Amino acid sequence: LQAMELAEANIRMSELDRLKSAFLSTVSHELRTPLTSILGFAKLIGRDFTEQFLPLASGQAALEARGRRIADNLSVVFHEAERLTRLINDVLDLSRIESGSMHWRDRRIAPLDVLRTAARSIAGLLAARPEIVFVFDATEQVPDLFMDPDQLIQVVSNLLQNAVKFTRTGEVRMTVRTDGEAVQIVVADSGIGIPESELESIFGKFHQVGRGDTLSDAAKGTGLGLAICGQIVRHYGGRIWATSRLGQGSAFHVRLPCLAQEEGPARIP
Ligand code: ADP
């Protein structure tokens, strides 16, 4: 009897979990529309203001100072709306994966081509951070994977963005290797590092390492990026983990099983 009750409770729990994810997904979707307006109009007001109002104030110190304050305040609105958009997109992604409604566009892919695309996607970030050198180290031939290339880009871009965000100066290096059974991607940085006690919990939802943050508003994250990476990598039967030395840097390791047959990847035990 007890086993039956347990099984029933389990079914109820997973149904609740599915409902929760479906609810989150609807709500997030509804939130995105007004936010797109807020972002668009904040941008428009900012442009009109700098192009039309500020030139009028030129030469009048008091007006100029007031103008600069308005522009600063508007940029806070803009960055916070951007952050909220990121948060909603992340919640939406996570709830899609958790509720099983994610549409995985799996196909045979050449990982190096996809990783090059991911590397290009952070070029803009790197341009603003000349004190960081980016190295893409993939000398070997790498076997094909069977997965959604956009999801691989999502994982690696997340790791690369974090690496840049938490590194003041030095190197961000993406290494790709294979042992024939799996492709191993390592994103390593020379940044602030992660305390040993948090190396696992950072993959949980909304977990951020508290360190009296010195990050700019624009760089503040959602605490969901690594949770999403974890879900995606596990969906493909792979593993993701972090190693780090405080004050010296961190490395994020992703292991993805190679294509065994056309039907899908082999599982890493
Ligand atoms: P966030 O949006 O905050 O970056 P993530 O889930 O991507 O969320 O990361 C969770 C937390 O893990 C970050 O807030 C940060 O404290 C820590 N972290 C992630 N990547 C790094 C890194 N490369 N170096 C140092 N800390 C990191």
Image (spheres, rainbow, N blue to C red):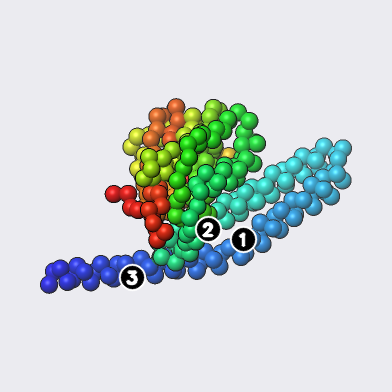
Q: Nearer the viewer, residue 249 or 45?
A: 249
The three-letter amino acid code for the residue at tag 2 is Ile
The three-letter amino acid code for the residue at tag 3 is Glu
Q: Describe the element under mark 2 as helix, strand or loop.
A: helix
Q: CA distance from mark 3 to mark 1?
A: 30 Å
Q: Position of residue 183 (x, y in %)?
A: 42, 44
Indicate which disc residue 15 carries.
3
Indicate which disc residue 152 carries.
none
Q: Position of residue 15 (x, y in %)?
A: 33, 70
The residue carrying mark 2 is 88
Q: Is residue 68 left or right of residue 33?
A: right
Crowding at label 3, few (<14), some or many (≥20) Cα neighbours within 10 Å? few
Q: Nearer the viewer, residue 85 or 180?
A: 180
Q: Position of residue 245 (x, y in %)?
A: 40, 29
The three-letter amino acid code for the residue at tag 1 is Leu
Choose the circle earlier in sequence order: 3 or 1.
3
Crowding at label 2, few (<14), some or many (≥20) Cα neighbours within 10 Å? many
Look at the numbered discs 1 and 2 and tell me whether their residues touch, using CB distance below 8 Å.
yes
The residue carrying mark 1 is 35
